[in-house]
Image (cartoon, rainbow, N blue to C red):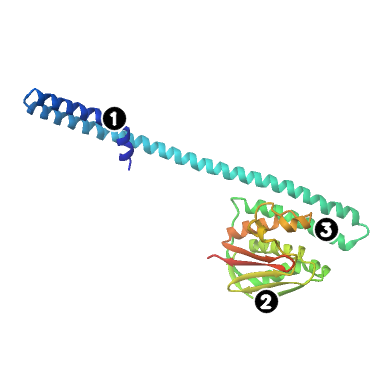
Amino acid sequence: MFWGEYLKKRLSLLLIVFMGLGGFWFTFLMWQLPLTPLRNAGALLVLALVVYMIFDYLAFKKAQQILRDLQADVQQLTAEITHRTQQEKEFLDIMRIWSHQMKVPLASIDLVAQTRLPELKKQTFALENYLNILLEYLRINNVATDFRFERVDGRTLLNRLVKKYAIQFIQKNIAVEIIGDVTLKTDARWLGVALEQVINNAVKYTDRGRVTITLSDQGIKISDTGIGILAEDIPRLFAHGFTGYNGRLDKKASGLGLYLAKLILDKLDFQIEVTSQVGVGSTLIITHTK
């Protein structure tokens, strides 16, 4: 595999040797000298050259193999350093956004603690959600994180999540319906964390109408009648810290919930697709890739 490189490096040596032999051959012909000694000497020289090149090639091949192994190690280390640097950057960004987001519910709690109990519950719920996002992000990025794959009843899982958000649905007078059922082989806890972020967004950006959750063998479909998402925002919807159109309307949006959901779903081998129309609503479809 290294012959091509080796011959390129030794081309000048080969040219000198064969030009020398050619020069001797031409001289012997010009002076009409016997060619037998020249042939014997040439054969001996070529044999010596072949033996030299074999040993030289073996040494060259070993050196090149060591060099390529070192280059592969350097590339791997560079990739790992880049990945770790990106993870640290994302973590710092999340910490910065998270700490800013924490100030909003804390300030609201301080203002309404004595007078407005429903608002206090709402802000306490938001505070708990922000804390959970941070904790789950730290856990999912931990190399020691284990997944426990088992048969999970989708309807039971979604009923639990809807019940958790019951106060939000009631306060905003949003109807919620779960249709069908599906059994999935996955990690129930982590899938629940991902689905919760989708439901949280559906509640947050729906002021009237309904949220419909459809379960089938094709996957999990969550539809709402909310404000919708701009078409140009959909490709970056799950990017780290991206808020887009919704974020410009809701100044408290962090862009972390759907990023966390996508991170978890990727690790669980799920695919998530989004369709949306501004002013009409959004639909997120989650399907198993295996």
Residue furthest to the top in view is 31
Spatial distance from mark 2 to mark 3, Cα to Cα?
A: 30 Å
| Distance (Cα) linking label 1 and label 2 | 78 Å
Q: Which residue does the numbered mark 2 point to in the structure image?
A: 179
Question: Residue drawn 79% across and 51% down?
Answer: 102
Residue 185's image quarter? bottom right
Q: Residue at x 60, y 54 (%)?
A: 145
Can I make out residue 187 in this image?
Answer: no
Left/right placement of residue 121 relative to residue 51 reads right
In the shown orientation, is residue 136 left or right of residue 82? Answer: right
**Residue type for callout 2:** Ile
**Rendered location of residue 141, percent (x, y):** 62, 51
Disc with the residue nearer the chain's start (2 vs 3) = 3
Q: CA distance from mark 1 to mark 3?
A: 79 Å
- The three-letter code of the residue at mark 3 reads Gln
Instruction: Name the residue tied to disc 3.
Output: 123
Residue at the extreme bottom: 180
Residue at the spot x=15%, y=25% of the render? 24
